[in-house]
Amino acid sequence: MPEDIESVEEVIRTGWVVQGPKVREFESMWSEFTGSKHAIAVSSCTTALHLALIAAGIKRGDEVIVPSFTWIATANAVEYTGAKPVFCDIDPDTYNINPEKVEQRVTEKTRAIMPVHLFGLQADVDKINGIAEAKGIKIIEDAACGFGAYKSGVHSGLKGDFGCFSFHPRKAITTGEGGMIVTQNDDDAALLRSLRDHGAEVKVEGKGKPYLLPDFKILGYNYRLTDIQAALGIMQMKRAGEIIKKRRELASRYDEALKADRRLVVPICPDGYEHGYQSYVCLFRPEEINSGNADEINIQRNEFMQYLSDNGIATRPGTHAVHLQEYYSTKYNLKPEDFRNSYIAEKCTLALPLFPGMTDNEFNYVVDKIKRYKT
Ligand SMILES: Cc1ncc(COP(=O)(O)O)c(C=O)c1O
C-alpha cells in the first residue's frame, strides 16, 4: 500500500529509526487491540519466547512442555535457556496441544507449559491453566499465529503469564521480522523492557538525566524492534478489523467450496472460538490415513502439492513435527511414533493460499484446480 511506504519514509526522514516513538505507538495499538495491559515489541516471536521464558525464571535443569507439532522456534527458545523441551502430542482435530496429554507429561521438574495457537485457532488455555495453576507452573502462550484468534471473546495471549506474537511475513500482520510480548504483570513488563535492551535500566519518561548512559544490572540482549518496522505494523493495525474479516471470509468460502470433497478435511472452529486463519490447513486423504501409512499418504500429498505448484498455486505442509527434526530426535532419542498425531499432521497436511489481497479470480482458480485433480 502506498501509505505504508510513506510511513516508512517518514521514519527515515526523522532519523529516529530504532526503539522510538513508532515502537511505542505500535505497542499501545497492540495493547488496545488485544486488551492486554502491557505490550513489549521485540525483534521476532522467537526472541519474544526466549525473553518470556527468562522472565518466567526458566533455567538449566527445568522442563517446559511444548507441542510436538509446531514451528521449531517454540522448542528452540526452550533450548536457549538450557531447559529441556518436553514434547506433547496434539489433538488431531484442532492441531493444538492436547490438555489431557499435557497432564501426563508434567513432572516435578516442569516449570512452564507453552501452548501454541496453531494456524490461528486458540489452544485450550483454560484447561491448561487448570493443570498449571495449582503447581505454580507458568504459561507462555506461543501466539505467533494467534492474531485475531479469540475464545469466549478473549484474544489469544491473555490467559497465560505471557503471550508472544510474530510479525514474520507468513503472519497476518507483518513487519518483515518482528514480535510482541503481552503480559498483565507490571514487574514482568519492566523486566522484559530491560531484557530486550541489553539489560539496561528502564528510564521513566520525563525523569532522570537522558544525556547519561543507563546502568546494567542484569544480562540482557539486543532484541529491539526498529521504528521502520513499527511504522509498517502501525499501518496494518489501522486495518486490523478489515484484515481479519477478509481472512475469515476467504476461509468460509473455502469451507463451502470444499465441504463435499472427501479428499480434504478443512480446518475446524469449535463453538466459542473465533479463528484468525493465519493459515488454512487441510488434512489430505483423511479416510485412508491409519496409524501405519502416513509415509504413503505423504507421497500422495506431495504429488497433489506438485500438481498445484505446476498450476502456479503455492502450498506448504502445515508445519513440522519437531520431534522428527534431527537436532531433537538425536538429542532426546525420539521416534516418529512417540507423538503419532504430530507425525501424521506433518506428513498429511497442507496449507492452501489465503491472503487478504486474494481476488475472486484467484480464489476460483485454486478451487477449480483442486476439484479437477484426478487421483
Ligand atoms: C508457532 C510459531 N512459533 C514461533 C514462530 C517464530 O516466529 P518468528 O519467525 O517471528 O521468530 C513461528 C513462526 O513461524 C511460529 O509459527
Image (spheres, rainbow, N blue to C red):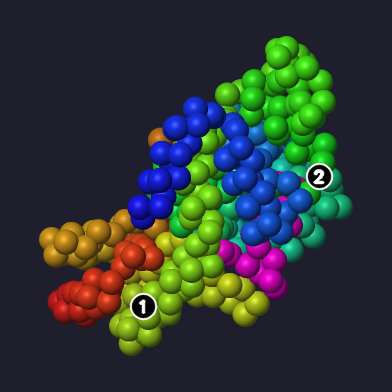
Q: Amino acid at mark 2?
A: Asn
Mark nearer the viewer, 1 or 2: 2
Residue under pointer 2: 185
Which residue sits at x=48%, y=55%? 236
Magenta-tinted stretch: 148-163
Which residue sits at x=82%, y=26%? 207
Q: In terms of secondary structure, what is the magenta stretch mainly?
A: loop
**Quick one: label 1, few (<14), some, or many (20+) residues within 10 Å?**
many
Where is residue 298? Give x, y as percent: 29, 59
Magenta span contains residue 289: no
> Which quadrant of the structure image shows residue 205?
top right
Is disc 1 in contact with disc 2, using a CB cutoff of under 8 Å?
no
View extreme (bottom): residue: 260
Q: Which element carries disc 2, helix, strand or loop?
A: loop
Instruction: Count how many numbered circles sit on residues in the image.
Output: 2
Which residue sits at x=71%, y=59%? 35
Residue under pointer 1: 254
**Quick one: label 2, few (<14), some, or many (20+) residues within 10 Å?**
few
Determine whether, in the image, residue 44 is placed left or right of residue 351: right
Q: Is residue 105 above or below residue 265?
A: above
View extreme (left): residue: 310
Evaluate whether residue 103 shows in this view.
Answer: no
> Which quadrant of the structure image shows residue 80?
top right
The quadrant of the rendering that contains the N terminus is: bottom left
Q: Is residue 82 above or below residue 172?
A: above
The quadrant of the rendering that contains the C terminus is: bottom left
Where is residue 85? Give x, y as percent: 60, 39
Sequence-wise, the earlier of marks 1 and 2 is 2
Q: Which element carries disc 1, helix, strand or loop?
A: helix
Q: Amino acid at mark 1?
A: Tyr
